[in-house]
Amino acid sequence: MLHLRLIVPADRSDEVVHLLEHTVGCTHLAVLTGAARSPAGDVVLCDVAREAGDELIGALRRLGIDKSGSITVENMDLTLSAHADQAEEDAPGEGADAVLWSELTEATHEESTLSVTYLAFLSVATMLAACGVMLDNAILIVGAMAVGPEFGPLAGISTALVQRAPRLVWRSLWALIGGFAVAMVLTAGFAWLLDAFGLFTRSMVEADRPNTAFIWKPDWMSFVVAFLAGIAGTLSLTSAKSGALIGVAISVTTVPAAANAAVAFSYTDYGQMWGSAGQLLANLGGIVLAGTLTLLVQKGLWAAHRRRTAPKTAPSDGM
């Protein structure tokens, strides 16, 4: 269930209440007349089944409530109510399959910002991965994947493509490209520093490294793994089940590939550098493609489901 808290101008309150009362899956409706002060108006509270949430939020936005008042949506982990159970039963579809596009757009917009914190996480992850590839330590590689925040911009690109929002595409691309550029430059400097202290050596770069050699040897399996991880990551963002992001973190070699490219560049091993760059591009492309296709399929399936379950319009008497 979702909990909606609305601030509605007093002259629009009846219109909004009428909408809520006639929304299948909506319950626990309460109106606090004149309770809001900034902006002034009525406070309207209700709960709605997740599968009916996106359509209701869209209707409220078409009424302009997001501009004249406010729309706040919260996920409810536990609701003990026969009315809520009935609302979920009446609403068409399954809550886990429903996509809240407004929520997804906001989440990816926030995660696609080129901020100091984002750069710090990505840089630390890339440096940690550099230690992993130099020591041929798979545990450090997994740790670096878990720290890396790059899935946010990748999901932002997919969401923006499906929603036809070019500004968000460029915003996400800027965070992705700019973030990796900064992280790789800092990692190259990090490698030079550790070389000066004798902790990194050229022999470590040129060693066989069987546990991490796949990072700079891209093939079609690299793309397949990235594609599957992109599907899992996108589903974890759009559904009510979000635990799958951990699987994405340990399945894709974006950060380790960037780290190995930076380290190989610092030792002028351009063969490894270009191999790692190819691995990085294959993974990034696979994730974006998978994410975009997953969102398109979800959007199409949900639209078809709505058409099947929509009430039939009764024919008018005047012919």
Image: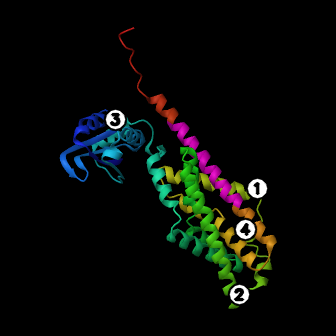
Kindly state the secondary structure of the residue where label 1 is placed.
helix
User: Which is nearer the N-term, disc 4 or disc 1?
Assistant: 4
The residue lying at 41 percent from left, 38 percent from top is 55
Q: CA distance from mark 4 to mark 1?
A: 13 Å
Q: Is residue 61 left or right of residue 113?
A: left
Residue 296 on the magenta segment: yes
Q: Is residue 245 left or right of residue 95?
A: right
Q: Quadrant of residue 276?
A: bottom right
Q: Which residues are magenta?
A: 281-302
Q: Position of residue 241 (x, y in %)?
A: 48, 53
Q: Position of residue 289 (x, y in %)?
A: 65, 50
Which residue is label 1 attached to? Answer: 220
Query: Compared to 90, does 186 lie above or below?
Result: below
Q: Nearer the viewer, residue 97 or 300?
A: 300
Q: Residue furthest bottom?
A: 197
Q: Nearer the viewer, residue 138 or 191?
A: 191
* Contact, mark 4 vs mark 1 (Cβ under 8 Å): no
Q: Residues within 10 Å of mark 4 (few under 14, many from 20)?
A: many
Q: Amino acid at mark 4?
A: Ile
Kindly state the secondary structure of the residue where label 4 is placed.
helix
Q: Position of residue 287 (x, y in %)?
A: 63, 55
Residue 224 on the magenta segment: no
Q: CA distance from mark 1 to mark 3?
A: 48 Å
Which residue is label 3 attached to? Answer: 23
Q: CA distance from mark 3 to mark 4?
A: 52 Å
Which residue is label 4 attached to? Answer: 215
User: Which is nearer the N-term, disc 2 or disc 4?
Assistant: 2
Which residue is label 2 attached to? Answer: 195
* Contact, mark 1 vs mark 2 (Cβ under 8 Å): no
